[in-house]
Amino acid sequence: MTTTPYPPELLRDVEKRRTFAIISHPDAGKTTLTEKLLLFGGAIQLAGTVKARKSARHATSDWMEVEKQRGISVTSSVMQFEYQGHTINLLDTPGHEDFSEDTYRVLTAVDAAVMVIDAAKGVEAQTIKLLNVCRLRNTPIITFVNKLDREVREPFELLAEIEDVLKITCAPVTWPLGMGKAFRGVYHLLQQQVLTFTPGEERRSDGEIIKGLDNPELDKRFPLEVGQLREDVELIDGASPPFDLDDFLAGKQSPVFFGSGINNFGVQEILQSLIDWAPPPQARDGGTRMVQPAEPAFTGFVFKIQANMDPKHRDRIAFFRICSGRYSTGMKVKHVRAGRDMKLANVLTFMANERVIMEDGVAGDIVGIHNHGQLQIGDTLTEGENLGFKGIPYFSPEMFRAARLRDPLKSKQLQKGLQELGEEGAIQVFELEGGQMLLGAVGVLQFEIVAQRLKDEYKVDAIFEPADIHTARWLTFPDDVTRRNFEREQALRLGKDIDGNPVYLATSRYNLEVTAEKWPKVMFHATREHG
Ligand code: GDP
């Protein structure tokens, strides 16, 4: 082994970073788990902090409410806390109504994800979508099967469903001892001990442990449940692969934990697995070369832009993931796309529920940069090198609206507004033949926010009408002749995205299939990378 070329202090700090997100279907228990994780990290003193935000998220129609909710979620978009000498960055992925492209893009900025499954419901729609996004980068997934204190489904059945639907191998690490009213705890398959559960009591590190599956203490304490546990463990030994770190890191296998978030049971094991198994920041594709996290030169990319509290100031926060080097206050960096320098002053970091001025950050950390539109999603900042980080995707929208003006004289402003909001990533904008503007989103809230921002920031009163579009596909052609022929035949279904790339706008799944079949050499892509 040669000695490492990287500054040892930087390397040490990078190795201590864990940057992850929690993915789940609404109501599976993400908020509850977040709160308990923060409690362990000492980041919040009282439960309830995260809940306050949650109740705000149901108001969607009123702009002030949206702003408020957006504002609050700016502070809780990233929660940094310390645990066992590690610095943990937990990135929030909004659920439900405020589900948008942001959610997807946040997943490009993490190194691991915790997937929460409601044990009564199993794999749900949004979990499938989010996991597919994680798969684009083979992000390692830790699974938490939640709500074991309720009457839930058979654990083997749940694992089979996860494997079947999500196409990821499950390696159980803990296994439930009883469930519902008779939930007594979990057996830790690697440590070969039972962690007992007492309803209504939060479990901290000093909870009771019974060592060994054959321990007569188990027969004495849990005579009705222990027989099933022993049978299950025998079955697991035959049916499930043991936990394999390499398979986990490759995104092929997920360690599975059972517990009850609300009772703080099983939560510490999740945190421990993040520290023990989840990867520290990895090398990233900088376009021209791989960028190692402990390289001394500062680099990173913008993965999300959020409008700030005060719409009058058009102030936005760009969420930026550091990929290498060390951030220092007031440092000068190169904005590669714009080809000019900028100074990073007043950069924010996010400590649980408050914003503080960032002083020091390394790979894996997320910083918030105030900007007035100069930064876009996918932008790379460096200390001079011309890099362009890859892998921050646009996703094919799932809802479409046609933009129509109340005052036709304002079409220039509408165009400008949509161009800017599209570049910022608030919405996807497509231009059809004849100049009509079509908006695409993955969450309906995106339309509301864009309509309101057009009014406030661009003084444009636009109506968004339902459009008869099912999905969009980015096109690539094998040669110019094919492109021209395709364009001629499909003129009515063609549009351009904000960067001028050709897009096929399908009226139905059938329409897409028929066209794709007819044009086998034309590629139809459901995602496109920024830049
Ligand atoms: P989110 O929508 O995924 O953020 O879910 P929440 O954390 O808000 O949880 C949804 C509901 O499930 C809330 O009413 C929680 O109190 C409840 N919940 C969360 N964890 C548990 C659990 O372990 N057991 C039970 N019985 N309920 C839970």
Image (cartoon, rainbow, N blue to C red):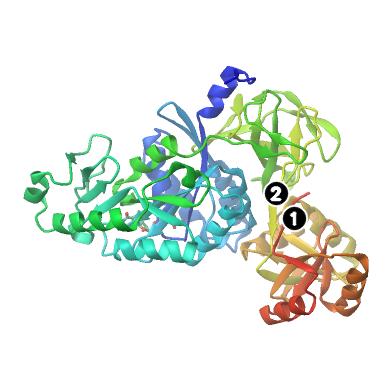
| Residue 159: percent from left, percent from top | 37, 61
* Residue 441: image tag: none
Q: Badge 2: few (under 14), some or many (20 or more) residues near its Cα, within 10 Å?
A: some
Under tag 2, what secondary structure? helix
Relative horizontal placement of residue 246, taking residue 516 as reference (left or right)? left
| Residue 125: percent from left, percent from top | 50, 67
Relative horizontal placement of residue 11, taking residue 160 as reference (left or right)? right
Tell me which amino acid carries mark 2: Pro
| Residue 413: percent from left, percent from top | 86, 59
Q: Which image quarter: residue 382?
A: top right
N-term mark: 2 or 1 = 2
Relative horizontal placement of residue 259, taking residue 96 as reference (left or right)? left
Can see residue 71?
yes
| Residue 194: percent from left, percent from top | 21, 44
Q: Which image quarter: residue 452?
A: bottom right
Residue at point 54%, 24% (across, down):
13
Could you tell me if the residues under marks 2 and 1 are in contact, i.e. CB atoms within 8 Å?
yes
Q: Is mark 2 within 8 Å of ligand 1?
A: no
Q: Which residue is mark 2?
A: 311
Query: Considering depth in this image, is 362 or 138 the residue closer to the camera?
Result: 138
